[in-house]
Amino acid sequence: MKNSDVRPTPPVPPLVRIGVQSDNILSLSLNDAIRRALENNSDIEVARGDVKVAEGTLTSLQGVYDPVFAFNPQITSSVTPTTSSIGGAGASGTVTLNSQQFNSTFTKQFATGGGQYQLFFNNTRLSTDSTFSRLNPFYSSSFGITFTQPLLRDRSIDRFRHDIRIQRKKLQQSDSDFRLRTIQIIDSVQHAYWELRFALHAQQVAIDSLNLAREQFRVTELSVAAGTVARLNRAEVDTQIATSETNLLIATRNVTTAENTFKQLVLRDPTAPEWQAEIMPTDAPVDNVLPINLSDALAEARANRPELLRLRLQEDINKVDVQFAKNQTLPRVDIVSTISTTGLAGTPATADTLSSSGVASGATSLGQVPLITGDPNSSATAFLLSQVNQIRAAQGLIPATVPFINVTPNSVPSNLIGGYPTTLGNLFSLGTRNIVAGVTIQLPLHNRAAKGNLAVALSQRDQLVASIHSEEQAVELDVRNSVQALETARQTVMTARQATHSAELQLAGELQLFHVGQSTTFLVFQRENTLATARNSELRAQADLNNALADLQRAMGTTLRTNNIMVEPPTTP
């Protein structure tokens, strides 16, 4: 056969990867990948938002203990009809009242004991045309404190403290949920990282296997041309090359699939340029792991697993519910007390004031007014006086004498004469006081609502005990399986490495025999396929070992510590 009949060695098929630029390579270590995932993963952002919501809710609930200042200005003007001069009406038969009120309060709920106090400071300026007002206008002020203290129900715990204590536990639960989600993301990133590295190395093994087949193709073509090998051997070589090319194409597809899975975890924006890049893992897999002590692993899991921490916090919440429900079954006995003082001052009523009211025309002296005045046709008391005098006149008696009341300035105590400053002076001199102390007692006859809530809380406690026991069993099973998987993967790596070494020796020996004519193309290809399988098995074992190590970290709850991830505890107001 002529050398011109020798077929050229077929090239390696183009490894087309859709949407990936071969000249754009992004090298990432495992730590870099984890950092990117935690920064960009949407689930992490949602879990972080849950913690912030819980913090805000706790702050909102604690606002019940913020002091509250209230100011209530009010202006009142009224004209009231009065049929009797005893009501202070003048000739018009009405009493006019104008008042300006400026009331203020300062209220504070106690965080301990369930009590409450309220300081009040009320001020009024009042002017009237009533004939009985000795001061016009006058100022009135009151200052005091009201204190309420529960003795039984709501003393050790009330609705406010119940909600705040529970929200604190829910905040810690949201932190446990955030840690759990973080651990799950890290575990997924670790798996995706090692799976991508395995796919890339498996692709390289397929390339190496194809190159061995291409080399065998070249040797076979020369042998056929020299007449030392039958043409039928070409079919074996062609079959091997086709099989190797198929395996390479599948391996390339697996690289793209693994890479897309990895990118989905570490990239948030689907339009980010990194989606066009080839991801190149730079960390070498761990292939030498010491055996794990099962007892230590179980102890770590019981102390660190967020699922168990969450259930223990739920148990604490139930204890608060039980305490509150028991407290609400008690009768209500509250001490209610008030201590206050008042102040009063104003301008004494004058003759001009009285005259303007239309009742001073009959006064015998300045500042004196008759007790009964007005037109008998419009005033009942004046009509009654007129009838009495007619009866007396018929009997020859003198008319009844109408008594006068003294409204001269001298009739008003001197300490009450003045303006608003005098009122404040009288207020804080403590010359007047008002002390009230009492007890409010409320005895519910059945109180079925509180008893029902207590029964529910006790039932939930029993359910939590069962849930915690079930979760502890699940955690122990998870740890035991993870320890076994790690040990199996550790031993598999050692046996796979030995199998690869033996397959390399077998192929080398078979090639030597083939070159001296003591072997066949079929046997060489068998050795090549055995070596490719052994290499893939070793790579698979290394990936499984690192995945098992990540799973054990997750099962023990040590993922964050092992990967140097610090999660700040939530802010507790």
Image (cartoon, rainbow, N blue to C red):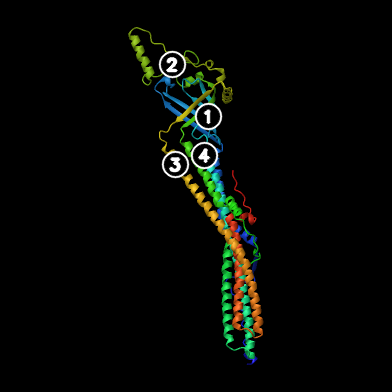
| Amino acid carrying mark 1 in the image | Thr
Q: CA distance from mark 3 to mark 2?
A: 71 Å
Q: CA distance from mark 1 to mark 3?
A: 36 Å
Mark 2 is surrounded, within 10 Å at the Cα level, by few (under 14), some (14 to 19) or many (20 or more) other residues, namely some
Residue 307 picture location, percent across and down: 54, 52
Q: Which mark is residue 146?
A: 1
First along the sequence among labels 1 and 4: 1
Tell me the SS state at disc 3. helix
- Considering depth in this image, is 464 or 195 the residue closer to the camera? 464
First along the sequence among labels 3 and 2: 2
Q: CA distance from mark 1 to mark 2?
A: 41 Å
The residue located at (51%, 42%) in the rendering is 319
Is 318 rendered above or below residue 480?
Answer: above
Residue pointed to by mark 2: 371
Mark 1 is surrounded, within 10 Å at the Cα level, by few (under 14), some (14 to 19) or many (20 or more) other residues, namely some
Residue pointed to by mark 4: 160
Residue 260 picture location, percent across and down: 57, 66
Residue pointed to by mark 3: 455
| Amino acid carrying mark 2 in the image | Leu
Asked whether the beta carbons under mark 1 and mark 2 sit within 8 Å of each other, the answer is no
- Considering depth in this image, is 411 or 316 the residue closer to the camera? 316
Mark 4 is surrounded, within 10 Å at the Cα level, by few (under 14), some (14 to 19) or many (20 or more) other residues, namely some
